[in-house]
Image (tube, helix red, strand yellow):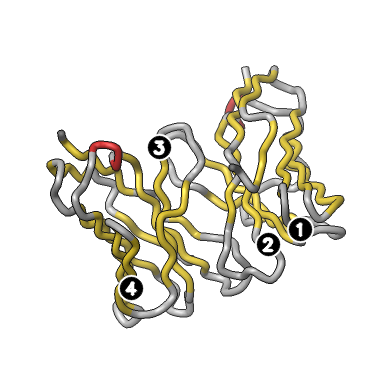
Amino acid sequence: QKEVEQNSGPLSVPEGAIASLNCTYSDRGSQSFFWYRQYSGKSPELIMSIYSNGDKEDGRFTAQLNKASQYVSLLIRDSQPSDSATYLCAADMDTGRRALTFGSGTRLQVQP
Amino acid sequence: GAVVSQHPSRVICKSGTSVKIECRSLDFQATTMFWYRQFPKQSLMLMATSNEGSKATYEQGVEKDKFLINHASLTLSTLTVTSAHPEDSSFYICSATPQGKVHTIYFGEGSWLTVV
């Protein structure tokens, strides 16, 4: 069964610190990876997508992909209390189909 | 603003009745839309793929006769939960990808279903 694994947390970091969120996936053929942020009771919102090995930066967020290790991470710099949410890692395991397999999510708490 | 709209955002229905949830792409056409379900404190689970003009395909363990999907146009997919039971209470979310934009996935705002 194709899976995406995340630590459920909570991950607690102080305001201004770097939050590091990690994810592994089982299907070596997966090509596209996504990080979503979900506030309680709301639909997930896309933070970053990444398709190539290496780092991709967008503002305070950096996504990292290592296909050899089947590992995806998200770094949040200068964490803010408003970043407190559940972060979902997702992979497009049927390439081109656009249906996503989600991890269980990591709850992040940024302490003011 | 939202590019994929769901309606209703919240619905309460009595056990045994049916409820329809709409997923509409607002400014693009989508031959395929996806329906997910999320139980409290759990992740999104893919339920089914909605295909415009043809039958939906369902993930393992999802009852096709209970969750009826209709994708009658390139901008609208509907999910009907038939003979709803309290265990069907969940957050239902759809997603869609514009034709020709393979790396873009839009999610709807979600629909909370409570069956009493």
Q: Please give the label number shown on residue B29.
A: 1
**Mark 3 falls on what kind of element?**
loop
Please name whichever residue, B46 or A36, is drawn nearer the observer in this view of the structure: A36
- Residue mark closest to the camera, 4 vs 1: 1
Which quadrant of the figure has residue B12?
top right
Amino acid type at circle 2 is Pro
Q: Please give the label number shown on residue A78.
A: none
Q: What's the CA distance linking mark 1 and mark 3? A: 28 Å
Q: Is residue A24 left or right of residue A28?
A: left
Q: Residue at image x 40%, y 37%? A: A39
Q: What's the CA distance linking mark 4 and mark 2? A: 25 Å
- Residue mark closest to the camera, 4 vs 2: 2
Please name whichever residue, B47 or A73, is drawn nearer the observer in this view of the structure: A73
Amino acid type at circle 3 is Tyr
| Quadrant of the image containing the C terminus of chain A | top left
Q: Please give the label number shown on residue A65.
A: 4
Q: Position of residue A101 (x, y in %)?
A: 50, 59
Amino acid type at circle 4 is Leu
The chain letter for the residue carrying disc 2 is B
Dot 2: few (<14), some (14–19), or many (≥20) neighbours within 10 Å? some
Residue under circle 2?
Answer: B98
Instruction: Single out the residue that lies furthest toward the bottom.
Output: A68
**Mark 4 falls on what kind of element?**
strand
Residue under circle 3?
Answer: A39
